[in-house]
Image (cartoon, rainbow, N blue to C red):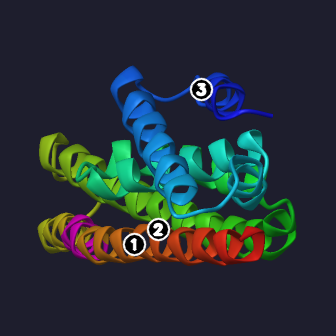
Amino acid sequence: MTKADYLNELKRALAGLPAAEVEDILRDQSEYIGDAVSRGRSEEDVLRGLGPARQLAQTLIAESRIERAAGVSNVGSKIKHIAVATVAVIALAPFNLILFFGPFLVVSLILLSAWSLVLGLGLSGGLGAMVYIFSIPGTGAGVLVHAASILFLLGLAALSVSVAALLARLTTAFLAGILTYLKWNLSVVRKRTQ
């Protein structure tokens, strides 16, 4: 295989990335191959050292997706980008499916359950208070019971807001942890393939 063949195969394998990024990668790889050949290594030896173009492309795609996920600040977009990066890393090293997916799924479901609970408590507290506020007192319960119910439900809504703030921090920390793991995992895969 020649340098041109290798770069063409790499370009085809990088089809999912933006064109400018693909051109940068191809330019970097071309320079790397050219520098190694100018230092006395044969082109075939350099290409063999790089490994299969498809595997290099998968590694570069995973790296690009991790960097893109790290650059996003919006939590909703970050979750989407982390999911895409996770799929890219799992495709790169299938053993990650066993090691990563189980704990990831458990923690994700715990966070989703916590968010659902907070949303339910907040809505029930807020809507319940509205019902008590707009209902006519004197339907059998005393005014103090009516006021106590309103205060309890408003307290429940306020508690859910406080817990939501804590959950927002936990979710952000969880996403940062996933990104750190994906970066570490990518470095392990790179060392293993070199």
Give the magenta range. Answer: 155-163
SS at mark 2 in the image: helix
| Residue 14: percent from left, percent from top | 59, 30
Q: Amino acid at mark 2?
A: Leu
- Crowd rating for badge 1 (residues with CA inside 10 Å; few <14, some 14–19, many 20+): some
Spatial CA span between label 1 and label 3? 31 Å
Which residue occupies 47% across, 76% down?
180
| Residue 133: percent from left, percent from top | 13, 49
Q: Earlier in the sequence, mark 1 or mark 3?
A: 3
- What residue is shown with label 3? 11
Position of 66 relative to 106 (above/below) = above
SS at mark 1 in the image: helix
Is 53 included in the stretch rendered in magenta?
no
On screen, residue 32 versus residue 95, left or right, reads: left
Q: Amino acid at mark 3?
A: Lys
Q: Quadrant of the C terminus?
A: bottom right
